[in-house]
Image: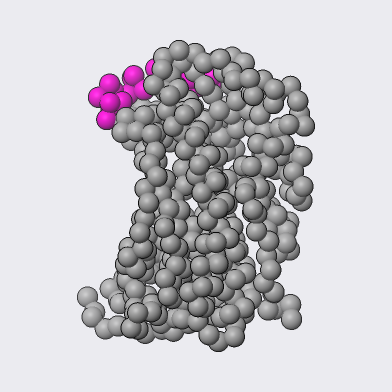
Amino acid sequence: MSSAIRSLSTTCVVAGGGPAGMMAGFLLARAGVDVIVCEKHKDFLRDFRGDTIHPSTLELMWELGLLDKFLARAHQEVREVTAEFGDARFRVGDFTQLPTHAKFLALMPQWDFLDFLACEARRYPKFRLLTETEAVGLMRNADRICGIRAKAGGSNIAIAAPLVIAADGRHSRMREAAGLKVRDVGSAIDVLWLRLPVEKGDPTEPVGRFGAGQVLVMIYRGDYWQCALVIPKGGLEELQRAGIAALQKRLREIAGFARDRVGTIESFDDVSLLTVGIDRLERWATDGLLCIGDAAHAMSPVGGVGINLAVQDAVAAANIVAPILLCGVAPPLGDLDRVQYRREWPARATQAFQLFVQNRILALHVARRIQPEPPAVVRVLDRVRWLRQFPARFLGLGVRPEHVCTRDCLAG
């Protein structure tokens, strides 16, 4: 292995090519900022679980003039969300009433979303995407961070930059290297992900099914159902001890119209565990470094809002730092703190909602073995269509949705 260090320089280096990193890199390059995005994998073709593109993100695509082009990629459209208690179905969310150009939630593989952003970003001469390049450490000049250290195959790379954006996920090496303090908010549940086949005549809208001590969320993905089975925190070992037949029995009890297909889950190799955790940084920035997305606030899968919060962070960050970087100066810490000031409350509010749902509803429900009665609010939402816009607004638009304020450097 070579010990030679390759040196690069840029105006902003982004660690991580997920939704937050790719959107930040795209928007900065679009504004005329020289930017490098480091992605540790060869490409985006990996098994992501978060494949929901919410109306807030679709509205950003419209603002960028890219909505039609984006929706030309294969996707499914969700206009309504339902909940089932036993054999009774209730409509609880209606995206068609939202004040957006795309009045639906799009289901698209995350690799397609990221590839789309990469393709659009490459139109700008100041964008560089380094794949198979993993950010492993930070560079410092006195007390200020001035770049990253990365590994690409057998090579070491030093990328100097006035600003580092850490978008390297919930186990961020960048925030750890910077010594930023993380507050673990906790979670009382975990989730098992699995797939069930689609058959002719199936519904196509997502559904949350509540049975005796069980919760199963089913999301239609065209040729399969993406299913999330809620289990108590650390409950996988107990399920494994009981054996695959016991898991199949549980699924038959809760899977409704798909109950006769659970035999396709032949072993625990067909199931993947998502260890649910919620945390957030006490401070998102230090001199020369800004954390966004999961690196700043790891979200629960409740509501499927993680991608969209990450994208909103990226938009806010680009709006604030791009004009400063274009002036040829490093953003002062106070300006980096403005990103947290704008985005922390939406993140905290969303996490508070997720914690309430996880700990006060889902965890209590899976601990009991009785069939629950539909809450009064669910019955009211089903009866009054106008009210169904409010759950859709919270999930689809979120708290304080962002808008693109940076200019397009190619448009003059």
Position of residue 388 relative to residue 332, above or below, is above
Applied colour scheme: one colour
**Residue at position x 44%, y 84% in the image:** 9
**Residue at position x 76%, y 51% in the image:** 101
Q: Is residue 7 left or right of residue 243?
A: right
Of residues 18 and 188, which is closer to you in this image? Answer: 188
Residue 143 pos. (x, y %): 35, 79
Q: Can residue 213 be seen in this view?
A: yes
Q: Does the magenta stretch include residue 111?
A: no
Q: Is residue 247 left or right of residue 12?
A: left
Residue 213 pos. (x, y %): 43, 19
**Residue at position x 58%, y 35% in the image:** 220
Q: Is residue 400 left or right of residue 144?
A: right
Q: Is residue 13 left or right of residue 70?
A: left
Residue found at the very far bottom of the displayed protein? 328
Residue 180 pos. (x, y %): 36, 63
- Magenta part of the protein: which range? 237-259
Position of residue 38 relative to residue 238, above or below, is below
Q: Can residue 259 be seen in this view?
A: no
Position of residue 13 relative to residue 208, above or below, is below
Q: In which quadrant of the rendered view does residue 219 lie?
A: top right
User: Which quadrant of the figure contains the N terminus?
Assistant: bottom left
Of residues 112 and 212, which is closer to you in this image? Answer: 212
**Residue at position x 56%, y 80% in the image:** 325
Q: Does the magenta stretch include residue 253?
A: yes
- What secondary structure predominates along the stretch shown in magenta? helix
Question: Across the whole image, how many numbered discs are drawn on residues?
Answer: 0
Residue 126 pos. (x, y %): 56, 80
